[in-house]
Image (spheres, helix red, strand yellow):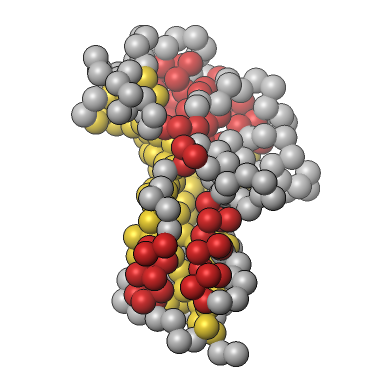
Amino acid sequence: MPSRSIQLVLHYDGSRFSGWQRQPADRTVQGVMEAAISRICNEPVTVVGAGRTDAGVHARGQAAGVRVPDKWRAGDLRRAINAILPEDVWVRSAFEMRDDFHPRYSATSRTYRYFVATDAEASSPFRSRTELAWHRLLEVELLSDAAARVRGDHSFRGFAVKGTAPEDDNHRCTVSRAEWSNREGGLQFEIQANRFLHHMVRFLVGTMLDIGSRKRGVNDIATILESEDNSLVSPPAPAHALYLERVEYPSELYLDPK
């Protein structure tokens, strides 16, 4: 049966999901999406994500790929899916893609953002669910210095869960952007790279927060980057303040205007 390749760009609140990847007994984003699209198409449909977000992590730009019967145009599919999805998932946009599009392997970069709340209302229940409330010393200059040392091509084995990639993988990632900036109510960390390892962003943020609060020195970044394991890294920052912001692909993979 003729089919077409569609890219879906998703928003989701990760609070009540056990991450992206389908699991037999737990509620996941992939599981919810596959149930909805399979219902619409009257046949099993596999949804492939650009990345596997952890339990509790949110997204405002997760990319997912599906192959659906040819009768489904991108806009019609988006409207049909949104009509039956639960309130914590939403398809922001949909694009028709070339047949060789792969949501994971075709991606040229991914961007994550982490939110730290530092003002008097940081512990508000309306914010503490999606931001990390921080009421201690935090020096932005030290955070910025640490972030600058992350940029470039490095092995991030020291900032990843052991086994996150095969042992023969060099664990190298090219970070094109890593910076802290002020925002209303606090700070945000934004990082863009060609790939990310399991827990990598959270380990980076946790370590940088320890540096910014003077629990450890900024030179520790280089030491951990040179490490063969994650024994020197700080505990990962909590998942609830992390967002997958966007995934980028070559323009020639799009069949319709992006």
Q: In the figure, 197 relative to 124: above or below?
A: below
Which residue occupies 36% across, 76% down?
A: 76
Point out residue 101 in the picture as x, y percentages from the top left corner: 53, 73
Q: Quadrant of the C terminus?
A: bottom left
Which residue occupies 57% across, 46% down?
A: 27
Point out residue 40 in the picture as x, y percentages from the top left corner: 49, 73
Q: In the figure, 119 relative to 181: above or below?
A: above
Please, which residue is most extreme toward the left here? 184
Q: Nearer the viewer, residue 192 or 70?
A: 70
Q: Nearer the viewer, residue 129 or 183?
A: 129
Q: Is residue 117 left or right of residue 77?
A: left
Point out residue 132 in the picture as x, y percentages from the top left corner: 39, 24
Q: Quadrant of the N terminus?
A: bottom right
* Whether residue 116 is visible: no
Which residue occupies 42% across, 43% down?
A: 13
Task: Please tell me in which quadrant of the rendered image residue 137 appears.
Answer: top left
Q: Nearer the viewer, residue 207 or 150?
A: 207
Please, which residue is most extreme toward the right here? 167
